[in-house]
Image: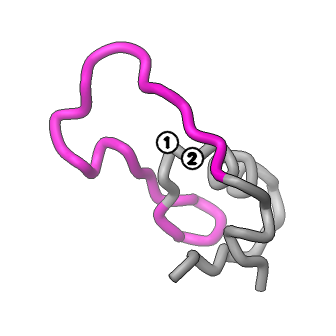
């Protein structure tokens, strides 16, 4: 299983548009592996954009 830190240092971004109304606005569920994806971390978004991938093991 691939670990998040194996993908390198965090690649953070800033939200465009309105501020999130709650913390859940920063996440979506990957339709392929059903893992929550933090859209504030580009590494996670790119990983889950691949058509075939395993779940990421999150850093402790």
Residue 11, image x, y percentages: 65, 42
- Read off the magenta span: 10-36
Rendered view: 35 above or below 48: below
Residue 55 lies left or right of residue 21; in this view the side is right
Extreme-top residue of the structure:
17
Q: Which mark is residue 40?
A: 1
Residue 37 lies left or right of residue 5; in this view the side is left
**Label 2 belongs to which residue?**
41
Give residue 16's quadrant in the image: top left
Residue 39, image x, y percentages: 50, 44
Query: Which residue is rendered at x = 16% and y = 35% of the image?
Result: 21
Q: What element carries label 2?
A: loop
Query: Which residue is rendered at x = 58% and y = 59% of the image?
Result: 31
Residue 45, image x, y percentages: 64, 47
Q: What predominant SS class does the magenta segment belong to?
A: loop
Extreme-front residue of the structure:
9
Q: Which mark is residue 8?
A: none
In depth, the one of 25 and 60 nearer the eye is 60
Rendered view: 47 above or below 40: below
- The image's colour scheme reads one colour
Query: Which residue is rendered at x = 64% and y = 51% of the image?
Result: 10
Say few, some or many: other residues with alpha carbon within 10 Å of mark 1 (under 14 / 14 to 19 / 20 or more): some
Give residue 7's quadrant in the image: bottom right
Say few, some or many: other residues with alpha carbon within 10 Å of mark 2 (under 14 / 14 to 19 / 20 or more): some
Rendered view: 20 above or below 59: above
The reply to whether discs 1 and 2 touch (Cβ–Cβ < 8 Å) is yes
Residue 28 lies left or right of residue 35; in this view the side is left
Q: In which quarter of the image is the N terminus?
A: bottom right
Extreme-left residue of the structure:
21
Q: Does the magenta stretch include residue 54?
A: no
Q: What element carries label 1?
A: loop
């Amino acid at each position: 299983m691939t670990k998040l830190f194996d993908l390198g240092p965090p690649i953070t971004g800033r939200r465009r548009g309105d501020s999130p109304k709650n913390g859940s606005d920063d996440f979506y569920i990957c339709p392929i592996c059903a893992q929550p994806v933090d859209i504030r971390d580009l590494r996670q978004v790119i990983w889950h954009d691949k058509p075939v991938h395993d779940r990421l093991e999150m850093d402790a």
